[in-house]
Image (spheres, coloured by chain):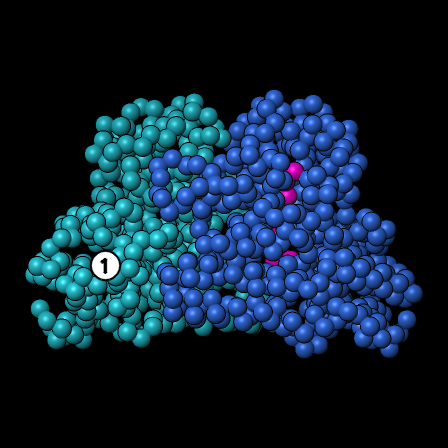
Chain colours: A cyan, B blue
Amino acid sequence: MDLAACEALDRADPLARKRDGFLLPEGLIYLDGNSLGALPLRARDRVRELVDAEWGRDLIRSWNTHGWIDLPTRCGERIAPLVGAAPGQVICCDSISVNLFKLLAAGLALQPGRNRVVAAEGDFPTDHYMAQGLQWLLGDARCRLDTVPREALERSLGGDVALLMLSHVDFRSGRLEDMQALTRLAHRHGVLVVWDLAHSAGVVEVALDDCAADFAVGCGYKYLNGGPGAPSFLYVAARHQAAVRQPLSGWMGHRAPFDFEGAYEGGEGVRRFLAGTPPVLSMGVLEAALEVFGDVRIGQIRAKSLALSDLFLDLMARDPVLADFRLGTPREHTRRGSQLSLHHPEAWPICQAWAERGVIGDFRTPDILRVGFSPLYVGYADVYRAVRLLSDIMASGDWQAPRFQPRARVT
Amino acid sequence: MDLAACEALDRADPLARKRDGFLLPEGLIYLDGNSLGALPLRARDRVRELVDAEWGRDLIRSWNTHGWIDLPTRCGERIAPLVGAAPGQVICCDSISVNLFKLLAAGLALQPGRNRVVAAEGDFPTDHYMAQGLQWLLGDARCRLDTVPREALERSLGGDVALLMLSHVDFRSGRLEDMQALTRLAHRHGVLVVWDLAHSAGVVEVALDDCAADFAVGCGYKYLNGGPGAPSFLYVAARHQAAVRQPLSGWMGHRAPFDFEGAYEGGEGVRRFLAGTPPVLSMGVLEAALEVFGDVRIGQIRAKSLALSDLFLDLMARDPVLADFRLGTPREHTRRGSQLSLHHPEAWPICQAWAERGVIGDFRTPDILRVGFSPLYVGYADVYRAVRLLSDIMASGDWQAPRFQPRARVT
């Protein structure tokens, strides 16, 4: 497999033309769409309309004339098919953290007599922190987080367990959970499941309805390319909507927000999960970014994602210079999301040296080089070049240069 | 007082030049900055940098290189002097609704043995809805909202009252509360106060520290001109920061967010009130919008605000055609924010007819024409013309045209 062969794969790739819909710096190979998706052309144009014409010219009237008021619903309905949800179950609002709090509180209230929330060790910390916050607020008798090793999940689902909270794809290892099997398992024990789709929505086939999922949250700024800190989304299965209630009962989730009634009365279905006024600029940009998905199926994206990561693994395996990287991601397609996690004691300086050569991956403590594959703007030749550049860095020892040495870092 | 005299006032106005820093449609008189502030030129330019250069070009690295990670703190510190707060007490995040939930829960936890939250009838509904949500979650024994008539506030502050939650300026009437007196009164009864500054921050002199206020929230998109749905801010007095904790304990409020520790440990001071990842585009635009305040004092803004609204009232009083409007806002300067609320049974069609003639006010159910004065971009001649156009509408009966008749409306 050489560069020419990879270029041929790109020419034959039905998703290759999608790359033209993104603005990426010339020559950059961006393998960090799992942290922050690239800028869609459409989002760049949309923000100008939003600011100049809607905010600047039409001002307050835009809530009606430009439909700002329906943004949370419209974004939710655009995301729904990407996560296997029929209409009326997904809405866009707040951050993942805040949405998890709503869902955990809502889920506990549906499970009288059960107080435990089981979660897997190593999942993204904010998920656990939010449960800890709820536990602090409610007391252990009403909410108790149990963080258990992944392999102990099944035996942890006792009769006092109300909720299981799990990442669909692990942010550190890239491991993909079996949503169907785990949801079934939980339901057999009377447990409801809250799925965190941050690292799967938009790149892995997610089948919330088919898996009879209960609740989910997801991220707007990773594979959905909604821009830095784009609002999150949440899913509440239709069958729970009549009974469910959540505590962040702000005016936007009220049955009639502009009647200014004294008593809160939740709106229809998933709308009652809205709290305050949405950040229109950020959400409007996310809505535009979602247009990219209008004419592709997630199945196509998933197939290319796996092909790209397989190519990466093949090229690495053939290069003895890269033998010191240990793969932390399962190799089986059914167990893998859209990133590869490469362990190396010098992952930090290597990541910096790679960036200097034009390849953006990212580092996760303590020793992980994360490599994310966003099939809408990453091609086969990109993967070829990225592996070659990594090989150059390792062969030359360039990563040992003082300028790449560890320092405090935030991403 | 004629148009020439008003134009002379504009020429002598030291704030008049500020108008050049805003993009407003030619000929429009915008008296609804209390709902959505106008677009600052600086914000328009900033969003292009944020999107094109920071997101599009520098991508994930911008969290460090462009300081996205410090946006909540930087915005908070820019807002602090506008609300009379010394550094380290204000942070920007989430919506008012979500921030109220944090503060109510935090405040209740500081008040063991007290469960009541007293609020004034007629305050903005989401404030009450959030307390109702917390009450639903915690149960009446730990949280009970009492909504009382404004004149009954004092006698409601019994020994079981933990918190008093009040709007500084009433959204409907424009009435300004005496923050100093009410905070003192509450403290005498052992009650902590949560102030909602949505309709005062940026236009009324707010002295949180001098009033020994405990907690406050405020709005980014009204007088701070941060754009539609701009993030909110919150204030926690320094003296409460060592003991206080809040339940929406997301990773951004963690002591070390990027260490990915398993257990939540709140960051320094007000930082622990952060929850999830901030909406960078919306918050970055707010940060830029706040630059407008860099070289003015709130005292200047307040003086002009009162002069503008006094002029409006004078001109109305001299025009018999406008005699049917009943003023719902206190006339005394010390009791009035920066809006006038004019009651009229036909307020809705009148508001529509005014808009057609280029004057944007807004309508609040059931019969209120709200007229907001944003001194950074509204001048004396604007006020003169607005009153003349209102007079024309009333004299001609134009507002009775079918196109102005009631319909469902959202703002």
Residue A111 place in picture, x, y as percent: 39, 29
**Per the image, is A379 magenta?**
no
Residue B383 place in picture, x, y as percent: 80, 68
Q: For this view, does A185 lie left or right of residue B279? A: left
Query: Is there any visible trace of residue B252 in the rendered image?
Result: yes
Badge 1 amino acid: Gln
State which region is magenta.
Answer: B214-222
Residue B110 place in picture, x, y as percent: 59, 29
Residue at 50% of width from left, 47% of height from top? A274
Q: Nearer the viewer, residue A14 or B178?
A: B178
What's the chain of the residue with tag 1? A
The residue that mark 1 highlights is A400
Which part of the image, by quadrant, shows the C terminus of chain B? Answer: bottom right
Query: Is there any visible trace of residue A260 in the rendered image?
Result: no
Residue at 60% of width from left, 71% of height from top? B41
Q: Nearer the viewer, residue A72 or B68?
A: B68
